[in-house]
Image (spheres, helix red, strand yellow):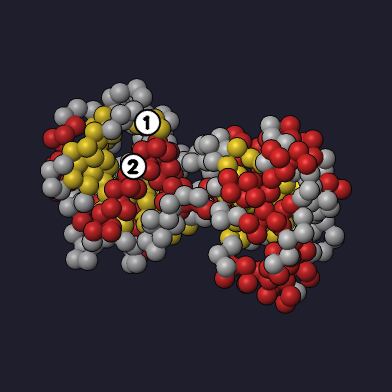
Amino acid sequence: MLKGKQIVLGVTGGIAAYKAVELLRLLTKAGADVHVIMTRAAQEFIAPLTFQTLSANPVHTELFNLIAEREIGHIALADRADLCIIAPATANVIGKIAAGIADDMLTTTIMATKAPVLIAPAMNVNMYTNPIYRNNEETLMDCGYLFVAPATGTLACGWEGEGKLASPESIFEAAVAAISPTDLRGQTIMITAGPTREELDPVRFISNHSSGRMGYALAKNAQRRGARVVLISGPVNLPAPFGVELVGVESAKEMQAEVMARIGGCTAVIKAAAVADYRPRVRSGEKIKKKDAELSLELVKTPDILAELGRLEKRPLLVGFAAETGNLNEFAARKLKEKNVDFIVANDISQPDAGFNVETNRARLLFRDGRCLEYPLMSKDALAAVILDHVATELAAK
Ligand code: CTP
């Protein structure tokens, strides 16, 4: 997403300036070319050399620097930026930008740029709640400036409350969202992910190898593209995606209950979860003890959640998955029809680089009008973007 993007990172004079180093690291790791501008006050907290070394670019500190003016210049920097971030942003710099004051390299660049500007404020709680600050923030928001709200906690000044710089990870996510297409804005997308667990007794369950990666990649991408995302997830070992409403479930029955309780208002549902098709008829309250005889389990069917959604009178856009070990097209086409979905993502899980528990996937998309689009091996993140492109197109056509 950030590969090759030109990002201006403005650092102002707050104790949280050191956290901008971590943000810079996340941005460069994602492939961005970062140009750091430090205000004079920022240099009291941290040395420019740190940013210079990590960004592999000269750090800009002076508005009238002969070399900088010849080689780059504040206007050139403003022009070349795909995104400007100010982190941490003090009440002072926010006030200056809101008032149209451009008296140093950072404020001049911000005023001259046509790129989106993302501001991550950090200050004392009383400054943050001061009506003067609030007016400035509102003015900037009205002009289209983006904000990452500060966190609440113990502040460097000793006060408790709002004003702590948002985490580098959340500023990074907001940065990615700021330069991502917003073609899913206004949509509410429900995504199911991961396996389900069907308990036999208090210590054992039936489950599958789903890691949840495909569903989580979809959730992260949809959120970045502006959708409100509800992620209903079976037990997985993945961090909660930023800005997503995460609902944890265990069994197919629980997943069904959470899906149906939240379906109102959803414009699309993507069912990436590997839902167990059967559960033990009886769940023993006590641990099942080993005996001399063999043990047979009686299994009963779980609810088919996707098919249930397909039967809804006013159903949202439905995307299903079909994980198969053979006859991919035939089985996927049958699921498309029988579950009444708009399109289905089919993948052959007998291949070692596709399907469960790997980072990559190789999929084909089957549509109701008979189209079948085949995609090469790609990361689950890239496949999520492809699926969401089709979701955006189908939603626009609805
Ligand atoms: N699905 C569901 N509820 C179930 C089983 C599956 O909602 N109880 C959904 C899955 O999330 C997926 C699609 O249906 O989007 C297809 O799942 P899959 O396991 O491939 O197919 P099944 O219908 O279970 O059929 P089979 O296991 O025989 O291939």
Question: In which quarter of the view is residue 395 placed?
Answer: bottom left
Q: Earlier in the sequence, mark 2 or mark 1?
A: 1
Q: Are marks 2 and 1 in contact (CB under 8 Å)?
A: yes
- Residue 128's place in the image compared with 213, above or below, is below
Between residue 115 and residue 354, name the one nearer to us: 115
Q: Is residue 48 left or right of residue 231?
A: right
Q: Secondary structure at mark 2?
A: helix
Q: Residue at x 44, y 44 (%)?
A: 216
Disc 2 to disc 1, how far (Cα)? 10 Å
Looking at the picture, does residue 194 appear above or below residue 130?
Answer: above
User: Which amino acid lies under the numbered mark 2 shown in the image of this protein?
Assistant: Val
Residue nearest the observer in this picture, 160 or 198: 160
| Three-letter code for the amino acid on which mark 1 is drawn | Met
Q: Is residue 160 visible?
A: no
Identify the residue at horizontal 72%, vertical 53% (top origin): 106
Q: Residues within 10 Å of mark 1 (few under 14, many from 20)?
A: some
Q: Which residue is mark 1?
A: 378
Q: Position of residue 39 (x, y in %)?
A: 79, 51
Residue furthest to the right: 44
In the displayed structure, would residue 201 be above or below residue 88?
Answer: above
How far from the left and from the top, in percent, is residue 89?
Answer: 72, 57
* Residue at which label 2 appears: 386
Q: Nearer the viewer, residue 86 or 112?
A: 112
The image quadrant of residue 193 is top left
Residue 311 seen in render: yes
The quadrant holding residue 273 is: top left
| Neighbour tally class for label 2: few under 14, some 14-19, many 20 plus, Cα within 10 Å | some
Residue visible at 37% across and 42% down? 384
Q: Secondary structure at mark 1?
A: strand
